[in-house]
Image: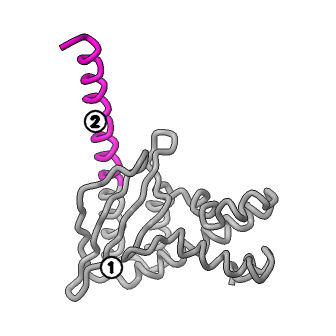
Amino acid sequence: MKPLSYALLSLLIVCQSAMAENKASAEKLLKENLAAVFVILQKQDLDQDAKNNEIIDIVNPMFDFSLMAKLTLGKKYWPGLTPEQKESFTQLFIKRLRASYLDRLTLYTDEKVLYESSVKVKQKIHIPTYLVSQDQKISIIYKFYNSDSNWKIYDLEIQGVSLIRSYRSQFHAILRTGTFDDLLTKLGS
């Protein structure tokens, strides 16, 4: 083998090793945090508000809520907003996402999470999981990107439906017939 071939082969091995390490760190982050959330849900000595506060402390660092807010409006609407509008929208969106997440968690009983192998999609990592109960199996794909050497969730796909695309569709429908203030009003209610 020529030196150039060795160099290319070495580079390929290093890149594959780095990607495997990245996938493993994203998987570890998800598994550890979901396990911690399920431990909190099973605590009998905490009321629901205390559980919610502990869960938010675990979940907040995992999600890039600001990016998620931006993605729901997309290139069509986000660039035209003032910094104040972006901030108002982002805060209302985060509040809605947290409330929705916590509402769904109150339905938790004894479900188990099954993890499949993570998948590299461009520079992102998708981790397919299944939430399994006695009578159903719900598919959830956690979509991560690397932000300043930390993995962050930027979207969830539940039963094949992207959370970001779903909200984008709803928000664009409101904005096609109404104003941005109408959207903020609906988001805040």
Task: Answer with left or right where residue 72 lies relative to residue 184.
Answer: left
**Which mark is on residue 174?**
none
Marks 1/2: CA distance?
45 Å
Q: Is 67 part of what is drawn in magenta?
A: no
Task: Answer with left or right where residue 78 lies relative to residue 60.
Answer: right
Q: Which residue is drawn at 53% across and 68% down?
A: 164
Crowding around mark 1 (Cα neighbors within 10 Å: few <14, some 14 to 19, many 20+) is: few
Decide: is 51 above or below 1: below
Q: Which residue is drawn at 31% across and 68% down?
A: 39
- State which quadrant residue 92 falls in: bottom right
Q: Where is residue 167 in the image (x, y as percent from the top left)?
A: 58, 74
- State which quadrant residue 64 falls in: bottom right
- State which quadrant residue 47 falls in: bottom left
Name the image quarter holding the C terminus.
bottom right
Q: Which residue is drawn at 28% across and 75% down?
A: 131
Q: Which of marks 1 and 2 is in front?
A: 2
Q: Give the range drawn in magenta.
A: 1-29
Q: What element carries label 1?
A: loop
Q: Where is residue 45 in the image (x, y as percent from the top left)?
A: 36, 77
From the image, tell me which residue sits under label 1.
Answer: 44
Kind of residue sitting beneath label 2: Gln
Q: What element carries label 2?
A: helix
Q: Residue furthest bottom?
A: 135
Q: Where is residue 142 in the image (x, y as percent from the top left)?
A: 39, 62
Q: Position of residue 165 (x, y in %)?
A: 53, 71
- The front one of 130 and 38 is 130
From the image, tell me which residue sits under label 2.
Answer: 16
Q: Which residue lies furthest to the left in this view?
A: 1
Q: Residue at x 67, y 66 (%)?
A: 91
